[in-house]
Amino acid sequence: MSARIIGVHAADDGGLPMAVRRAAAAGARALQVFTAPPTYYNEKVGFKAEKAAKVHAALAEAGIERRHVLVHAAYVLNTASPEETKAMRARAGLAKELERSTALAAGGCCFHPGSAGDSDPSDAAVRVGLTIRHALETVPETEDGTRVLIENTAGAGRTMGRSAEEIALMLAQVPAELRHRTGYGLDTCHLFAAGHDIATSAEAQRAVLERFVAVIGEKPAFFHLNDSQHPFGSNKDRHALIGEGAIGAEPFRWLLADAISLGIPLILETPSERETVVEDDPSADPADARMIALLGGFLAS
């Protein structure tokens, strides 16, 4: 497993240190968390140093490096919105996400760009990029180098970020001197749902990934490893356990064998087995442990 940094988005019932412990119990070397409730803008929510210190202590005990921690931004942030009120709240919200992620010393903060609504997609992509720029200009860079990372989308409705070209246009709005503080990541379910062929052969998958790298000009900073409940090109963002969805297990074996997955967080966002989590229970979700074992088997074979 040392060659790949596989992690989970663990339940944070009982606090973020408990999420760290649950991830470690599953065998994870990376972790994804929320720093605030994901159904709110949280544009005024901070992250105290005392809280960060407790998370850092838990990470050190678990052997998970801070740079392999990914913060997932709130789902409600619509940085592509043509509606000024929503766009301004999303702008403030993303800046706060970066502020909290920086306080946590996380490697990155990923976000969904949102929907263009009834506006031109190119204009929407520019708005997303300017929102990233605002966050980077608002939050000073630290030695930990926390980055703002665009996550590709499944392409439902008018959502942005389904293609390499859209992501490239977003990132093009960031000045050269700030560009190292941003980037993108790829979700396998979203790729598949958006009509990118990652499942018919290793060669087809490699072509998809190479196109993203060529168009955007860099490799992804993370992957979300998710199977899909819905068929190819469905534009539906519904995750399934690996090997139990329409993508199947083999494409994940190809991805783990590809050098593009080296050295970056590979985060499972697959369904949990537990319906409820006891706050003081540090044990792994059985599904997380099972998925990490499955991926470890791919690497060992």
Image (cartoon, rainbow, N blue to C red):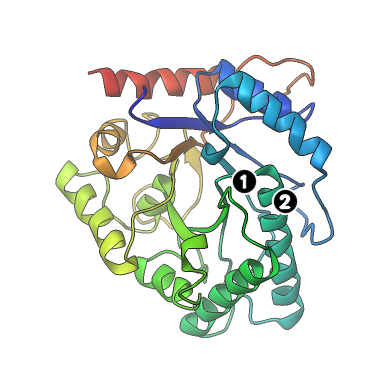
Q: Are marks 2 and 1 in contact (CB under 8 Å)?
A: yes
Quarter placement of the N terminus: top left
Whole-percent x and y of residue 296? 35, 20
- Residue 93 located left or right of residue 114: right
From the image, tell me which residue sits under label 2.
Answer: 100
**Residue 20 location, quadrant:** top right
- Between residue 196 and residue 215, name the one nearer to us: 215
Say whether residue 199 is visible.
yes
Say whether residue 153 is visible.
no
Which residue occupies 15% across, 47% down? Answer: 203
Whole-percent x and y of residue 168? 39, 71
Tell me the tag on residue 71: 1
Tell me the tag on residue 278: none
Residue density around tag 1, few if under 14, some if 14–19, many if 20 or more, within 10 Å: many
Find the residue positioned furthest to the left.
Answer: 203
Instruction: Please tell me whether residue 72 is drawn above or below residue 32 in the rendered image.
Output: below
